[in-house]
Each structure stands twice: as C-alpha cells, then as structure tokens.
Amino acid sequence: MNRKLIAVAALTVGGILAAALIPVDELPAQDRRLGTISFRSSGAPDAQGPFVEGVLLLHSFEFEDAASAFRRAQELDPDFALAYWGEAMTYNHPLWREQDRTAALETLGRYAPSPDARQAKAPTEREAAYLAAIDILYGDGPKTDRDLSYMQAMGRLSATFPDDNEARAFHALSILGKTDGERDFATYMKAAAVAQPVFDENPDHPGAAHYIIHSFDDPVHAPLGLDAARAYSEIAPDAAHAQHMTSHIFVAMGLWDDVVSANIRARDVQDARRAELGRPPNACGHYTSWLHYGWLMKDALPDAERGMAECRDWVRGGQASGAEVSYFANMRARHVFDTEDWAAAARLDADVDLPVYHFVTAFAALQSGDEAAASGSWDALRRMASARSNARDQIMLLELEALRAQQAGEHSRAIALLEEAAGIEEGLPFEFGPPASVKPPHEMLGEVALAAGDHERALRAFQRSLDFTPERTPSLAGLITSARALDRAALATDAQSRLDGIRGTR
C-alpha cells in the first residue's frame, strides 16, 4: 500500500481534541489488497486500521465485510463517529435498488439516539456533516426524495471540504444513486465528472475507479471508462466485486476475452472468501452468470456447458436462493438461445416458475416440434405476464408469436410482431450487462428477415442489435450473412474478421 497520512485522534490537550499524523503503513496490518485512501477521522489510533479497511471495502460494494470492519472499529473505539456512519452506509445499495433503513437506523442509534444527539456528539464539523448527510439518507419520506436530498447534502459536504476525496467520491456515488438504479445519461456524466478528478489525484482509489466505470458502462460511453476498468482490478485484487466490475466496460465494448478473465478472477476471489466463512462456492451468481455469457460469446462451449451444469445441479439440490434461481433461469435461456441447442432446455430443466424459464421452454419446444410442451409453458408465461405488466414479458410473448407465425409461413406477420418487440426494446431504459431480453428482438428480427429473403431489413436489424449489444456473436454472424447476400463485401469482411478474432479462429 502507498504511504499515506491519516489524521487520527491521538491526545487531548486542555479538553481540545488534537490530531496526530500516523502513516497508514504503521497502522494495524491490512491483509487484503483493496486500494489506498486518505480519510481523516477522530477515531482512536488502533481503530483506524479496521475503519480504513471498511471504507475501502465499502467503495468496492463488499458490504458484508465492510460492515464487519466498521464494527471492529466500533469495538476498539465505542465513540468513533465515522465507524457508525460507515456501517450505516453498508445498508444502502443505491445501484441495486436495495436499502435496509431499519438496520441503518439501529446502527446510528448505537452512536447516539437521534439526529440531534448525533450532531451534538460529533467531534468535528466535518464528521457532523457526514452524520447529517446519512441522517437525510435514512430520514422520513419516500426513498427517491431522500436520495435526492442526500445527494445535495453530499454536494455541500464536498464543497465545504474540497480536499476531502472521500466526500467527493461518495458524492459521485450519491449522484448515481439519485436515479434509483435507472440509467440517466446526463446524470451519469455528472457523476463521472465528480469521480474523475479523484481518480486523477489518486490512481489507487477504488471508489473513484468504481464509480467512473458505473458512469460509463453503456455501449456509447464505455471507451471513456476503459482506463478505469483496466486499473480497478489491480487497485483492489482482493475484492471480488472489483474484479467483476471491470467487465461492465468489457461487455459494453464486446471484449469477451476480458469479460471471461475478469469474472474468473471475481468468482475465484469470491469463492476463496466464501471458503474462509465456511460457505459453499457460488455456482449460480452474478459473476458466474456473466462468465457463462462470456464463454457463450467466445463459443467456448465445454466451459459454458460445465458452468451451466454446476448451476443446474445447485438449483436442483433445493438449496438455491431466490436470486440464484433467477440467475439459473437467465443462464439457461441464454445457453439455449446462443447455442441454438433446443434440446438443452429439457437437459437443463429444474422446478422453476419464472417468466424467462417458461419462455425458453416454450420457444425450444416449438423449435423441436413439441406442441404440448410449448402450449403449457406458453400459457404459464401468459398468466405471469398478465399479472406483472412487464415490458420484457411482452417482448417474450411477441417473440413466441413471431416464431409460430414464421413456422406457419406467415413471414410478414412474424416480421411485424418482431418490429413491435424491437420498438418496445428501444423504449426501455438501458440495462448494462448481458442482454436483459435473453433473445434480443432486433437480432431475432434479423434472423426472421434473413429466412424470408429480406436481406436489407435483416442487415439493418443486425446492425441495430449490435448497437445495443456490441460484438454479440449471433448478431455478428447474422450481419455477415446479410452483408454477403447484398454484396457488401467490405462490411462482411470486417464483421468476419471481428467474429474470427472473438472465437480465436484467425
């Protein structure tokens, strides 16, 4: 770790708090490599090590371990104001649409029983400002209103203390959090503008790199986040989320080798930590899901099959959480669609009642000529879609209708249905990562148009699909076919070169 100075409460002279500068590398050893920050606080010297570790973990969204670190700091210094602030921060996951307000207020209440009492007890003006901001975050009123007010409070804090890089970093995160997880490009650019100077001043700052990546992880802006993505895995090699987070940029740029490498590292770091805690490996999680998608794009089918089977077995074993079941359903859907192995839907079956599960079962059954299986799953999807009023459910229903129309020779109707589905997709907020619509409607439109001999329409559809999902290999393959049919030799050659590069065949 770089040698940084952190101001900590060291002695009291005549009742006035004084500060001593203690080098970070002289604080209690931090075993995990998580980055470097300088965060002044009035906590006791021996509590500074776990406190700084907690902040570093917090910046990498390792919330459970961060909370444990902050609680260790509290045990060493029961009056350590920012240690309670830090633990309370771990219960807010702004980009995951999660907040445990009850746990946060209980934590803050252990420091002092009310916002006024916390302000009175805070040892410095700056620490009082941190506590005031978090009391706004967990105050009364709708969450969206509190998120906005909290962002404004963090803006004031960082303006009042312009040398406090932690205030600036958490201000950037609060800007991202104002949208409650929905991408607003103008807002995300503002967050990047706040985080970038912190990264420039301290290239080893995990939060700055992390929030820059979140600001830019879409196909248009991703190249602006590539430097931060390349840096972040080196900044925090012992934070699983940091290893994974780099792949937000890599997916948005279609850098599949990097996607695979990043998520192998994330999986391995996470599983090592789970082993330390006596927990089993995570076969059906966020990192393994993205890893599986990277394997599919690279046509690394033995790896994809192995990862898919491990996830299936875990779900079949009956121990999977709701989130793990959801990851399994999406992985299964992508596996079936992206390999066009329709028999895999039956091979990878489990007792799962989710729309995407029924969708891929029905789609694969139609492709295999099993009308009975298709009808049952299609009906289940219709029932769930009717209850949920979800746009992506509607896309799935339209794609099933289009497939049936295509099989009946009704190519014009199939194309019209898929143009409707693509129009719905166009109007949805951008979601980073593997396609939220497991069969991208523009891609299916291109495939149906190709089968109908409408190569111009197919070409446009595949190009639009690649706008949403850069370097997605099924869309690249379709683009090559349509371009060749139209004698667009340069376009076909370029796309073929890109596809060969992804699959390692050149």
Image (cartoon, rainbow, N blue to C red):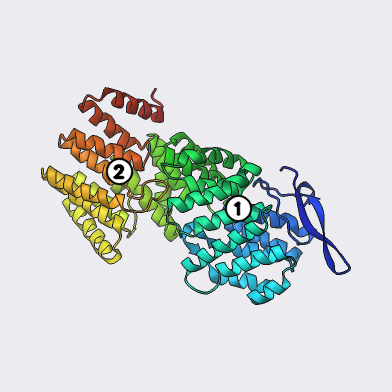
Residue at position x 76%, y 63% in the image = 76
Badge 2 marks a residue whose secondary structure is helix
The type of residue carrying mark 1 is Ala
Residue at position x 32%, y 51% in the image = 349
Residue closer to the observer: 375 or 213: 213
Count of picture labels: 2
Visible in this render: residue 239?
no
Quick one: quadrant of the C terminus? top left
Visible in this render: residue 210?
yes
Quick one: quadrant of the N terminus? top right
Q: In the image, is residue 389 above or below residue 442?
A: below
Mark toward the viewer: 2 or 1:
1
Q: Relative to residue 50, is residue 397 drawn left or right?
A: left
Residue carrying label 2: 337
Residue at position x 13%, y 44% in the image = 412
Residue at position x 37%, y 34% in the image = 299
Estimate the x, y position of residue 109 in percent, counting from the top left: 64, 74
The type of residue carrying mark 2 is Phe
Snapshot quadrant of residue 300 = top left
Q: Relative to residue 423, is residue 114 drawn left or right?
A: right
Estimate the x, y position of residue 181 in percent, counting from the top left: 45, 57
Estimate the x, y position of residue 327 in percent, counting from the top left: 41, 52
Estimate the x, y position of residue 251 in percent, counting from the top left: 43, 41
Residue carrying label 1: 169
Mark 2 to mark 1 CA distance (whole Å): 40 Å
Furthest residue to the right?
14
